[in-house]
Image (cartoon, rainbow, N blue to C red):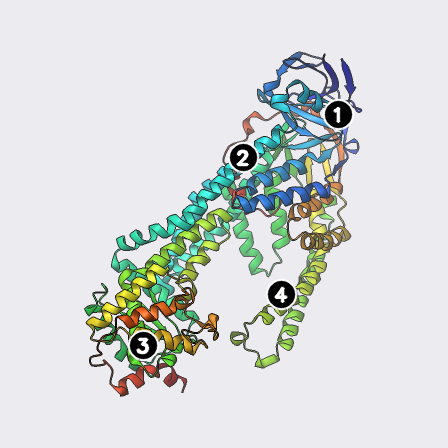
């Protein structure tokens, strides 16, 4: 049993059409042209297109040749070579390709969400400190184009040596600490790479009656500096951004992500990093002759200042105004308890009442 | 044994065919394109958008196969894998070095010196975009076949990139007035170096083409856009409370919604003002084309542009975006359906151009999504 179709043939050498007769038989398609005859074995045949009125066949051995036949020829092809040319062969091939793509996407996602964060730690440790300081200085400059710096020179002159002393006694690893206050009502503090520490005017307002609690928050940030968490966050975000950009096709997302990496909201650390920074803060406080339990007072005061009450489930704090290092962790009470467990004696406070008044009013003075 | 015959018979060897006997058009169905757009969108989600290269290939294959001149249809022979490989090459040779340089400059030079690196890099990027457009076009043509004969694009991609860059500067200096001339010149650069097999296309300023009111229509578009922007600016200023408005303190959701909502009438107004010019430019370029003794003509009208713009906007919105391929198809279909051919072509005399065999890895620009059309 054979099937015969009349159509036309383009040999791929010129644009000329030749009338063709194609006979489908066991083994292949036999094609008769006015000038010659040839046969395409079924494994060589490719379906170029199949429409309601006609189908177009090609051959792998003659990549530019096109045989145009009535649509029924497509059915004949499937009938004679069901293994290679069943109607579902294309769908099956596409399904296999999509399965490979989904697997590849899974690998990329695993690399993004597991590999990149895991690599950020060792990478941060291997980064020269001078390089980290330059990154931090530029990130700080970028942040200050968004958030206005409000501390007076006088308040920074008082604050910086105290911070540097805490850093030295706490073995933070960076001798120079750049501390800045930026104007934002949300109480927050964060550490950028390379010994850059920033606190917000909102934090000073929340802790205005407790310089030791403020210094405890600063000690926590110095803990991040010691653990180089700012640089880790930077690497994490940069890695994510570049891969994201690679996936989405150069839409500029990576660059945005890297820029955002320098901003407050993206400087989130993991639970383990926060716990490590707390632990470092206790040591730094103790070596500076201060009470680690002040960190507990700071947590409570900050939570209260944003409308919540620690230990209470009824009064929910305004999460939008919470600092990310409290917001991302539901265990503020546990941290308060942990800090209280480290309670020790308070030695001499570093600021006199008058000096502390200068520091805490850093942003208020510049309002005048 | 069963018999079946195609209705129409083929041209005999050496047959010359009149352009009038080669009606040009596209018979794509909107549902078919919606389906491709739909499954591409869904599979993009599950493959982190890797599928997009295959989806785009499916779209082109359908669009080309539905486009005909006379009895024969076009054929797209490109493959998804080619685009994907081109994309990977582009990522490693262009994008990562570029982003790396920008980030390194931001981190190491600081805000004061950063422009020394960023400005030259961004200027280079404009040239690269031109190069990419040219390479993508070369790829498209090399993967397009008609009657078994491949199309091809020759000429310098770098030259095109610099030309586009230079014209861009001239257009900026002249407040856009060099724009139409730039578009014609760039089209000439492309088409004068394009081939259908052994036949070279030519882009000539025929009388029909130069009769098109390019600058009259541009003047209307330019003035219309200017009036639109001024009216929009004044309206925004008034509705935001005049001089008391401080954008630094009003970045709330309502402000953003109002801003975007106010852009819709602006876009529609500017779209209407530009419709005539767009139709004129399409006719101007198509009427300049000739290949193998056949001259192209176009009946694209201003109404075509207006109707397409409005209906496509609705199509895009109501399909939540996955109708983007149907939108592209409808534009191409209208352009194709408005083309007619004049003169006589001898298909027997048109040979495959073996020197212009397709090369690999040209999906580079395509992979970067730098090309908005198709």
Q: CA distance from mark 4 to mark 1?
A: 56 Å
Chain letter of the residue beneath label 1 in the structure image: B
Which of marks 2 and 3 precedes in the sequence? 2
Assess disc 3: are there few (<14), some (14-19) or many (≥20) residues with their C-alpha within 10 Å of its C-alpha.
many
Task: Look at mark 3 in the image and give the residue it sits on.
Answer: A214
Q: CA distance from mark 4 to mark 3?
A: 43 Å
Assess disc 1: are there few (<14), some (14-19) or many (≥20) residues with their C-alpha within 10 Å of its C-alpha.
some
Image side of residue A72 versus residue B97, left or right = right
User: In the rendering, which numbered label is found on residue A97?
Assistant: 2
User: In the rendering, which numbered label is found on residue B16?
Assistant: 1
Q: Residue at x 41, y 60 (%)?
A: A261
> Regarding mark 2 in the picture, which secondary structure is present there?
helix
Assess disc 2: are there few (<14), some (14-19) or many (≥20) residues with their C-alpha within 10 Å of its C-alpha.
some
> Regarding mark 3 in the picture, which secondary structure is present there?
helix
> Regarding mark 4 in the picture, which secondary structure is present there?
helix
Which of marks 1 and 4 precedes in the sequence? 1
> Regarding mark 1 in the picture, which secondary structure is present there?
strand
Chain letter of the residue beneath label 2 in the structure image: A
Are tags 1 and 2 found on a single chain?
A: no
For the N terminus of chain A, give its image quadrant.
top right
Image location of residue A108, percent across then percent down = 44, 45
Res. B47 visible in picture? yes
Are tags 3 and 1 found on a single chain?
A: no
- Between circles 3 and 2, the one closer to the viewer is 3
User: In the rendering, which numbered label is found on residue B260?
Assistant: 4
């Amino acid at each position: 049993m054979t099937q015969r179709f009349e159509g036309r043939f383009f040999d791929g050498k010129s644009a000329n059409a030749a009338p063709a007769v194609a006979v489908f038989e066991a083994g292949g398609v036999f094609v008769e042209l006015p000038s010659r005859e040839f046969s395409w074995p079924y494994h060589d045949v490719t379906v170029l297109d199949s429409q309601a009125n006609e189908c177009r066949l090609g051959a792998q051995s003659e990549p530019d040749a096109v045989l145009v036949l009535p649509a029924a020829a497509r059915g004949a092809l499937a009938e004679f070579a069901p293994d290679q040319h069943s109607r579902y062969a294309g769908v099956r091939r596409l399904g296999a390709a999509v399965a490979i793509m989904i697997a590849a996407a899974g690998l990329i996602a695993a690399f993004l969400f597991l590999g990149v964060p895991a690599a950020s730690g060792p990478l941060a440790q291997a980064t020269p400190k001078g390089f980290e300081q330059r990154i931090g200085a530029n990130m700080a400059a970028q942040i200050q184009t968004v958030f206005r710096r409000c501390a007076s020179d006088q308040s920074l002159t008082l604050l910086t040596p105290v911070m540097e002393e805490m850093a030295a006694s706490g073995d933070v690893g960076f001798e120079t600490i750049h501390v800045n206050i930026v104007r934002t009502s949300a109480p927050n503090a964060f550490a950028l790479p390379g010994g850059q520490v920033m606190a917000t005017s909102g934090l000073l307002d929340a802790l205005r009656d407790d310089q030791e609690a403020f210094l405890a928050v600063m000690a926590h940030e110095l803990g991040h500096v010691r653990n180089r968490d700012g640089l880790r966050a930077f690497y994490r975000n940069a890695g994510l951004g570049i891969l994201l950009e690679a996936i989405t096709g150069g839409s500029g997302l990576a660059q945005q992500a890297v820029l955002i990496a320098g901003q407050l909201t993206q400087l989130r650390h993991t639970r383990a990093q926060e716990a490590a920074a707390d632990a470092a803060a206790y040591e730094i406080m103790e070596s500076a002759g201060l009470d680690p339990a002040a960190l507990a007072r700071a947590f409570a005061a900050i939570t209260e200042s944003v409308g919540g009450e620690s230990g209470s489930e009824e009064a929910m704090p305004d999460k939008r105004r919470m600092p990310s290092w409290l917001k991302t962790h539901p265990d503020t009470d546990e941290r308060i308890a942990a800090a209280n467990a480290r309670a020790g004696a308070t030695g001499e406070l570093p600021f006199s009442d008058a000096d502390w008044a200068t520091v805490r009013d850093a942003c208020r003075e510049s309002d005048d | 044994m069963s018999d079946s015959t195609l209705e129409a018979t083929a041209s005999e060897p050496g047959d010359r065919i009149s352009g009038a006997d080669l009606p040009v058009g596209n018979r794509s169905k909107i549902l078919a394109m919606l389906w491709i757009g739909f499954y591409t969108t869904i599979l993009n989600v599950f493959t982190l958008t890797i599928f997009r290269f295959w989806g785009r290939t499916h779209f082109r294959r359908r669009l080309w196969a539905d486009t005909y001149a006379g009895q024969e249809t076009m054929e797209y022979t490109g493959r998804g894998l080619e685009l994907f490989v081109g994309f990977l090459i582009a990522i490693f040779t262009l994008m990562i070095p570029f982003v790396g340089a920008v980030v390194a400059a931001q981190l190491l030079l600081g805000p004061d010196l950063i422009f020394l690196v960023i400005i030259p890099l961004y200027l280079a990027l404009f040239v690269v975009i031109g190069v990419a457009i040219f390479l993508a076009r070369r790829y498209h043509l090399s993967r397009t076949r008609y009657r078994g004969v491949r199309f091809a694009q020759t000429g310098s991609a770098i030259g095109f990139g610099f030309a586009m860059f230079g014209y861009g500067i001239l257009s900026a200096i002249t407040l856009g007035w060099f724009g139409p001339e730039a578009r014609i010149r760039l089209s000439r650069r492309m088409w004068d170096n394009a081939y259908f097999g052994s036949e070279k296309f030519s882009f000539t300023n025929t009388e029909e083409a130069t009769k098109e009111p390019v600058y009259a229509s541009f003047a209307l578009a330019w003035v219309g856009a200017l009036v639109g922007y001024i009216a929009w600016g004044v309206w925004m200023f008034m509705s935001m409370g005049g001089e008391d408005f401080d954008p630094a303190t009003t970045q709330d959701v309502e402000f953003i919604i109002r801003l975007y909502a106010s852009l819709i009438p602006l876009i529609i107004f500017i779209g209407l003002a530009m419709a005539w010019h767009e139709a004129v430019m399409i006719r101007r370029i198509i009427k300049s084309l000739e290949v193998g003794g056949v001259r192209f003509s176009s009946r694209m009208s201003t109404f075509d542009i207006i109707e397409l713009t409005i209906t496509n906007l609705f199509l895009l919105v109501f399909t939540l975006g996955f109708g983007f391929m149907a939108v592209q198809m409808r534009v191409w279909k209208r352009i194709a359906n408005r083309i007619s051919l004049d003169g006589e072509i001898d298909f027997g005399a048109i040979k495959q151009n073996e020197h212009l065999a397709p090369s690999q890895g040209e999906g580079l620009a395509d992979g970067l999504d730098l090309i908005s059309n198709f």
